[in-house]
Amino acid sequence: MQVVTRFAPSPTGFLHLGHVYAASAAWHAARQAGGRFLLRLEDIDPQRCRAEYAAAALEDLAWLGFVSDAPLRVQSAHLPEYRATLEHLAARALIYPCFCSRADIAREVAAAASAPHTGDTGAPDGSPYPGTCRHLPPAVRAEKLAAGAPHAWRLDMQAALAHVATTGAALRFFEPSEGWIAADPAPFGDVVLGRRDVPASYHLCVTHDDALQGITLVTRAHDLKPATHLHVLLQHLMHWPTPAYAHHALLTGPTGARLSKRDGAVPIRDLRAKGLTADEICRQVIG
Ligand code: GLU
């Protein structure tokens, strides 16, 4: 099987050395295996993504030599495909509409904290959901949907795990440095798969596109390893293949924290302006 890797930045700022590290991990994994390297822009978040950053990212990547072996996929241009995936999951009662606002959820979580634990755990991505809309009567749900009430779509984790149990399949992924790892998505609880503002979410789109683009090896930073447990579940529910996952170290700054725009990581374009070559920049991250 030909190895296919990808680099999938979100255009929320200018690319910095952390991105070069991630891109080169995917690039080298593809090249060493005689495989293909693909680029994707994960730009479904209208609040955080900007066209100017997307254009700058593509320009920087081309200058660095990370050229995609297939046409670029821009997620925001494919929202109907993600919506269709949500509809497919809704038809199987694996997701449900959630009409709660953030304030509603905060209130419920605070109330639950002072009551005996009800079984909902905090999600690794920081979005614990107390399950308020999970058991709304169908008539109430239908009425709210018909009235156009704003809503997100949440995975019904219990239903999803029950479905997996009926198939008898083992949820697992292969990490080349560690071997097979059992996936435990339960801590995510009823995670949002379709946001209120766009019929999509990071978790939905990344698994959809990895399958669509035939990605066989996902290389990405270690901080996304918890998400892989959820992604394996989504792949199972949607009958998508599970690629291998090589989670790599995070490039950290002088304080030991993840390099990020917020912590003043220097944009690649500034290093270019100072006269550094693409080779010099890549050598800074691979040593
Ligand atoms: N778009 C994500 C990011 O920029 C990467 C997602 C992934 O590699 O799975 O952090």
Image: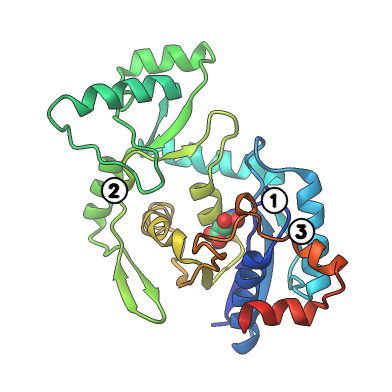
Label 2 or label 3, whichever comes before in sequence order:
3
Amino acid carrying label 1: it is Pro
Counting from the top left corner in percent of width and height, residue 121 is at 25, 41
As measured in the structure, the alpha-carbon distance from the residue carrying label 1 to the one carrying label 2 is 28 Å
Does the residue at mark 3 contact the one at mark 1 (Cβ under 8 Å)? Answer: yes
Q: Which residue is mark 3?
A: 57
Residue 90 as seen in the image, left or right of residue 27? left
Residue 189 as seen in the image, left or right of residue 239? left
Q: Which residue is mark 1?
A: 11
- Residue 25, quarter of the rendered image: bottom right
Q: Nearer the viewer, mark 2 or mark 3?
A: 3
Q: Is residue 135 visible in this depiction of the protein?
A: no
As measured in the structure, the alpha-carbon distance from the residue carrying label 2 to the one carrying label 3 is 34 Å
Mark 1 crowdedness (10 Å alpha carbons): few <14, some 14-19, many ≥20: many
Counting from the top left corner in percent of width and height, residue 92 is at 37, 39
Mark 2 crowdedness (10 Å alpha carbons): few <14, some 14-19, many ≥20: some
Amino acid carrying label 3: it is Ala
Residue placed at 31% from the left, 53% from the top?
Answer: 185
Instruction: Indicate the quadrant containing the N terminus: top left, top right, bottom left or bottom right.
Output: bottom right
As measured in the structure, the alpha-carbon distance from the residue carrying label 3 to the one carrying label 1 is 7 Å
- Residue 227, quarter of the rendered image: bottom left
Check the image and tell me how it is coloured: rainbow
Q: Which residue is mark 2?
A: 187
Residue placed at 60% from the left, 56% from the top?
Answer: 260
- Give the camera-side residue of 209 and 248: 248
Q: Is residue 239 visible in this depiction of the protein?
A: yes
- Give the camera-side residue of 145 and 167: 145
- Give the camera-side residue of 10 and 79: 10
